[in-house]
């Protein structure tokens, strides 16, 4: 059974890692938390996120540099 608290805790840990200066072991901790999130995610959602291509027509004026 998938427990959504695992994902919440892993994401919280990732955000805590990003909010402070780098420390030894942060890369390994990030990778461990990332694996937990991806393991509990819907495979179709993960695949769709990796397959998304930029669409210049629809993404125009959405905060890109230089606009």
Image (cartoon, grey):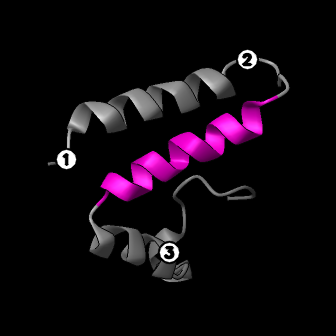
Describe the element under mark 3 as helix, strand or loop: helix
Disc sitting over residue 20 in the figure: 2
Q: Earlier in the sequence, mark 2 or mark 1?
A: 1
Q: Could you classify mark 1 by the number of other residues whose Cα lies within 10 Å: few (under 14), some (14-19), or many (20 or more)?
A: few
Q: Which residues are magenta?
A: 25-41
Image height check: is 13 above or below 30?
A: above
Q: CA gap, disc 3 to disc 2?
A: 28 Å
Distance between the Cα atoms at labels 3 and 1?
Answer: 22 Å
Residue 21: image location, x then y, percent: 81, 19
Q: Which mark is residue 61?
A: none
Q: Is residue 25 placed above or below 32 in the rendered structure?
A: above
Residue 17, picture quadrant: top right
Q: Verify whether residue 10 appears in magenta.
A: no
Which element carries disc 1, helix, strand or loop? loop
Q: Are marks 3 and 1 in contact (CB under 8 Å)?
A: no
Q: Between disc 3 and disc 2, whose residue precedes?
A: 2
Q: Secondary structure at mark 2?
A: loop
Name the residue tied to disc 3.
Answer: 50
Do the residues bearing badges 2 and 1 touch, measured as CB atoms within 8 Å? no
Among the 4 quarters of the image, the one containing residue 43: bottom left
Choose the circle earlier in sequence order: 3 or 1. Answer: 1
Say which of marks 2 and 1 sits in front. 1
At x 43%, y 70%, the residue is 49
- Per the image, the residue denoted by label 1 is 2
Q: Quadrant of residue 8?
A: top left
């Amino acid at each position: 059974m998938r427990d959504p608290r695992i994902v919440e805790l892993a994401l919280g840990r990732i955000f805590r890692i990003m909010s402070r200066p780098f420390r030894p072991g942060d890369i390994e901790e990030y990778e461990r938390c990332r694996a937990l999130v991806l393991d509990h995610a819907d495979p179709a959602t993960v695949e769709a996120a990796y397959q998304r291509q930029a669409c210049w027509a629809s993404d125009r004026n959405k905060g890109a540099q230089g606009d």
